[in-house]
Image (cartoon, rainbow, N blue to C red):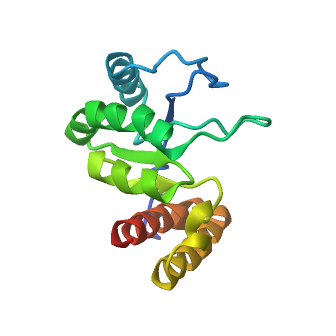
Amino acid sequence: MSPAPTPPPPVPVMGILNVTADSFSDGGAHLGAGSARRRVEEMIAEGATVIDVGGESTRPGAEPVDPGEEQERVVPVLEAVAGTCAASGVRCSIDTRNVATARVAVAAGASLLNDVSASLHELSAMTKSTAEHAHAGRALADDTRRSASSGVEAMRALSEAVRQI
């Protein structure tokens, strides 16, 4: 009799928390810290293992948001939900393409980076050392697209690269 197959690892489930007035998913329903915290509690109860907080719409035709405005949106929310997430074993993710926002988000409780541009678009204007991190980030983003299981590890490694910037 052959041994029972090893079950696959659990699939991460990402709950999306958009803190933009023009959000395509919730129309800006969770802009305040209290509303955001309640929504995060609901998503955790529904099985989310990662909460992804975004402060800039990426819908087609959306206007870019100044990084300062983006930070004003996401930092209070991350600070409000970080304890709830940690107590539930859930990780916080920041959805941004801005290096400055990534930095303050990590300080506010984010441990993962979800970069829709796959390279933090402003890195071209930064130092060579930072650009090397961006190159690693692009490679990691490619890994994420190839495989869900390696994508989790890629996100962890990319988050570590952001911490080192």
| Residue furthest to the right | 61
Give the percent coordinates (x, y) of residue 40: 38, 27
Give the percent coordinates (x, y) of residue 137: 54, 71
Residue at x 71%, y 36% (from the top left corner): 63
User: Compared to 143, does 17 lie above or below?
Assistant: above
Residue 27 sits in which quadrant? top right
Residue 4 sits in which quadrant? bottom left
Residue at x 63%, y 24% (from the top left corner): 25
**Apparent side of residue 72 relative to residue 135 in the rendered image (left or right):** left
User: Compared to 46, does 65 lie above or below?
Assistant: below
**Apparent side of residue 51 relative to residue 58 in the rendered image (left or right):** left
The image shows a total of numbered marks equal to: 0
Residue 144 shows up from this direction:
no
- Closest to the observer, 71 or 92: 71
Looking at the rendering, in which quadrant would you find the C terminus?
bottom left
Give the percent coordinates (x, y) of residue 17: 49, 31
Residue 129 shows up from this direction:
yes
Residue at x 54%, y 63% (from the top left corner): 151
Give the percent coordinates (x, y) of residue 123: 56, 69
